[in-house]
Image: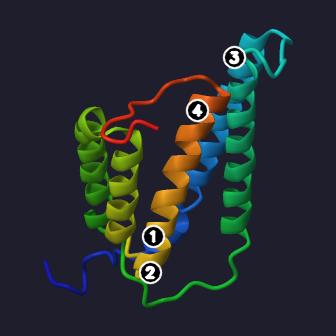
Amino acid sequence: MTAESEPERGPVAGRRSGWVLPAALLLVGIGLLIAAVNAAGGDFSPQGPRLAPVLVTGGWVVIAALYLVRYRHQNSEKDDEEPAGWKAPLGVVGCLVGFAIILEYAGFVVSAFLFIIAVSRVLGSRSLVRDVIVAVVLPLAVYFAFTRLLEIFLPAGVFPL
């Protein structure tokens, strides 16, 4: 078979199927939102455990809908885009495995710090200063929100906060 007779692969194929992920996220989010509302049974008090799933899945639906709208309204695409490879997804999976392994030993804050730095590098971030700021602020905010506000204790590890 010659090179001329093979179907062209790459960004053209991605344009036709690019709506699948946002649509799937939206449908799954709607299903989870319905399940969360049914599980709450009308009790959405801030003190109970039933409000958080409704808020999270509601946010999921809004973000997925915005993602789908953004995709549908893109006017121009670069013709010289490279097709997506496996490097980034496999890198993120590797980072998740590493996070899961070191979480028990180093604790949430240190593990999340390393995870954010590693994922940002894998995904091509070029600003180390921004990555470090996000990697310090975000895990600390999440840790204190869970431990102080929700009284859900995350692994403290080497820095008992």
Please state if 84 lies on the left or on the right of 22 as rendered: left
Q: Does label 1 or label 3 sit earlier along the sequence?
A: 3
Contact check, label 4 and label 3, Cβ < 8 Å: no
Please state if 58 lies on the left or on the right of 2 as rendered: right
Q: Which mark is residue 127?
A: 2
Q: Nearer the viewer, residue 111 or 43?
A: 111
Q: Which mark is residue 100?
A: none
- Which residue is the extreme one toward the top? 41
Residue annotated with mark 1: 131
Q: Residue 72, relative to residue 138: is it above or below?
A: below
Residue annotated with mark 3: 49
Separation of residues labelled 1 and 2 (CA atoms): 6 Å
Q: Does label 4 or label 1 sit earlier along the sequence?
A: 1
| Amino acid type at mark 3 | Pro
Which residue does the image show at 83% across and 18% down from the upper left?
Answer: 44
Separation of residues labelled 4 and 3 (CA atoms): 13 Å
How many residues crowd around disc 2 within 10 Å: few (fewer than 14), some, or many (20 or more)? few
Q: Nearer the viewer, residue 118 or 9?
A: 118
How many residues crowd around disc 1 within 10 Å: few (fewer than 14), some, or many (20 or more)? some
Separation of residues labelled 2 and 4 (CA atoms): 28 Å
Q: Does label 3 or label 2 sit earlier along the sequence?
A: 3
Name which quarter of the figure residue 50 lies in.
Answer: top right
Contact check, label 1 and label 2, Cβ < 8 Å: yes
Residue 100 lies, in percent from the top left, at 29, 38
Q: Which mark is residue 146?
A: 4
| Amino acid type at mark 4 | Phe
Q: Nearer the viewer, mark 4 or mark 3?
A: 4
Which residue does the image show at 32% across and 62% down from the upper left?
Answer: 118
